[in-house]
Amino acid sequence: MIKTINIKQENNNIITIDGPAGSGKSTIAKMLAKELKLNYIDTGAMYRAITLLAIENKIDLNDEKSILGIAKKSDLKFDNTVEDIDKYTKVLLNGKDITLEIRSKKVGEAVSIVSKLSAVRKYLVNLQREMALKSPSVLEGRDTGSVVCPGAICKIYLTASIDERVERRKKQLCRNNQSSLEDQIKCEIETRDKIDSSRNDSPLIVPDGAEVIDTTCMNIGEVFNFIKDIYIKKLKSVKN
Ligand code: DC
């Protein structure tokens, strides 16, 4: 049985960043983690890792019981010690580095199915809370401020126009020496937005009390400073 960790209470050591695909969550979360010396928890990478596990073990992606079974037997960890910002977090599954593999097309296409499974979500949410309680953390994903850590002191919801998000994803693919047609990227992002926002369990929503930031016309430095200021103000207000 999974022991449920309660993390509803106020927590001054946690920042959550949620938002749709391509809104800049990862870049900002990594920058905050580095600057503020926080542990970085990429919850999307965890759904991707379990999806990879299901694919490798040839388990039907809707077979909740088998996927949960294999997830529970696995050892999923982050290594946050890499200096380079782009490679900041290494994802280790049973000791193997799967950082690149979880970004593959086959995992990207399957992860929306696996992340709909309630038992898998419950298991990963618990793991995420366990990690977040170990040391001050920034969590990034779709439900980190609404479900995983609703008591976080600083909850951010990042968004941007669809065209801007497509452009960012295109540049990211280019940096990774991958290419994709603009229409194809747009279609993939819109499909993921729809699935993430409409699923029954923990859909993508603006968490209660979150600051909504539309980053369409902002550069990364501006977004970063804006969030850092919000966090510092919130910390000051609880200390006074
Ligand atoms: O952020 P990402 O693209 O790596 O996330 C991959 C998928 O995982 C995304 O389409 C939805 C799912 N996900 C989720 O359901 N809940 C989270 N907290 C994070 C990601």
Image (spheres, grey):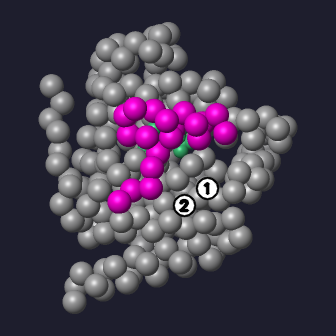
- Check if mark 1's residue and mark 2's residue have beta carbons within 8 Å: yes
Whether residue 172 is visible:
no
Disc 2: which residue: 158
Report the magenta residues as a range. 190-208
From the viewer's side, name the closer residue of 83 and 228.
228
Q: Residue 159, position in %: x, y? A: 59, 58
Query: How many C-alpha atoms fall within 10 Å of the one at disc 2: few (<14), some, or many (≥20)?
Result: many
Name above or below for residue 133 compared with residue 233. above
Q: Residue furthest bottom?
A: 240
Mark positioned earlier in the residue sequence (1 or 2): 1
Q: Residues within 10 Å of mark 1 (few under 14, many from 20)?
A: many
Residue identified by numbered label 1: 23
| Quadrant location of the C terminus in the rendered image | bottom left
Percent from the top left, x then y, of residue 10? 21, 65
Assess mark 1: CB under 8 A from ligand 1? no
Quarter-wise, where is residue 156 in the image? Answer: bottom left
Q: Residue at x 67, y 40 (%)?
A: 189
Tell whether 9 sits left or right of 188: left
Disc 1 marks a residue whose amino acid type is: Ser
Q: Amino acid at mark 2?
A: Leu
Q: Quarter of the image holding residue 225?
A: bottom right
Q: Residue at x 17, y 48 (%)?
A: 6
From what the image shows, is residue 179 above or below residue 216? above
Q: Nearer the viewer, residue 8 or 101?
A: 8
**Badge 2 element:** strand
User: What secondary structure is found at the residue carrying circle 1?
Assistant: loop
Mark pair 1, 2: CA separation: 6 Å
